[in-house]
Amino acid sequence: MQQYFVKGSAISPVTIEDKETSKHMFQVMRLKEEDEVTLVFDDGIKRLARVLDMENRQFELIQELNDNVELPVQVTIASGFPKGDKLEFIAQKVTELGASQIWAFPADWSVAKWDGKKLDKKVEKLEKIALGAAEQSKRNIVPSIKLFEKKADFLAQLDQFDSIIVAYEESAKEGEAAALLQAVTGLETGAKLLFIFGPEGGLSPVEIESFEAKGAALVGLGPRILRAETAPLYALSALSVLVELEK
């Protein structure tokens, strides 16, 4: 069954105001009256809905669905600006894997340089990608996107998290196989977790010191060196095993 995210309150009948959403519903999927879809509102609750009036894009809400697929912890993925369209790939995949927020910042060794205008366009593109991925993977929420123009602004946000984990290849070289397990052990339901990843060149020693000063744990992601766009996927998959599948 198709799922769509809808802005506003869950009050029946619901009128679909977003043009792209209504176009996909009635032109691409060719929904007709009495067809059913899943609508997800700002409260994150999925509701079964039936097409009531095609012309006016109205749906009747039938019932709430007991279907919550979110991770038990709120995970923010933060990446140093990567080259090309790697951030788009990261956004799509970490949305599928359960991230709550997707951040990026200008790391010391980032090759990509984005100013304010480029960042605004990038955010708009990433929001569309995250929306599509959230609908496809039947999420209860769409991850929020935030790109920082200045690293200092990113660092200023770190105090809000219950736990900070930094993927650091030197930790992998030192054989700290259990560091990731130790870092997530004991996280309570609803805890806010920040995962930080470097760009292609990795994170600088100065950045590592800054993160450690904020209480971050340095972890390796296995014995192999992963690409900038692969590391977040590994981390979220491992986290899912540790906090979802083993419980």
Image (spheres, rainbow, N blue to C red):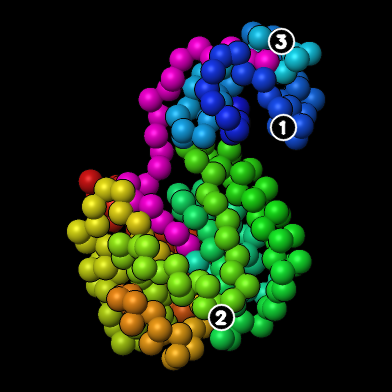
Vertical comparison of 162 with 129: above or below: below
Identified at 48% across, 62% down, the residue is 77
* Spot occupied by residue 11 in the image (x, y as percentages of width and height): 54, 18
The residue labelled by disc 3 is: 53
Image quadrant occupied by the N terminus: top right
Q: How many marks?
A: 3
- Secondary structure character of the magenta stretch overall: strand
Please name the residue shown 76% across and 32% down the image.
19
- Residue type, label 2: Ala
Which of the 4 image quarters holds residue 36? Answer: top right
* Mark 1 surroundings within 10 Å by alpha-carbon count, few (fewer than 14), some (14 through 19), many (20 or more): few
Which residue is rendered at x = 46% and y = 34% of the image?
A: 44
User: Which residue type does callout 1 highlight?
Assistant: Asp
Spatial separation of the CA atoms under disc 3 and disc 2 = 50 Å
Magenta part of the chain: 58-77
**Visible in this render: residue 93?**
no
Residue type at mark 3 is: Asp
Q: Horizontal and vertical percent for residue 183?
A: 26, 68
Residue shown at the point (54%, 26%) measured from the top left: 9
Does the magenta run of residues contain 186?
no
Q: Nearer the viewer, residue 230 or 132?
A: 132
Q: Quadrant of residue 33?
A: top right
Return the residue at label 1.
18
For mark 2, what is the residue? 107
Does 71 sit above or below residue 182? above
Q: Are marks 3 and 2 in contact (CB under 8 Å)?
A: no
* Mark toward the start of the polypeptide (2 vs 1): 1
**Image position of 53 (left or right of 45):** right
Of the numbered discs 1 and 3, the one sitting upstream in the chain is 1
Q: In the structure shown, which secondary structural element does the residue marked by tag 3 occupy?
A: strand
Q: Are discs 1 and 3 less than 8 Å apart at CB?
A: no
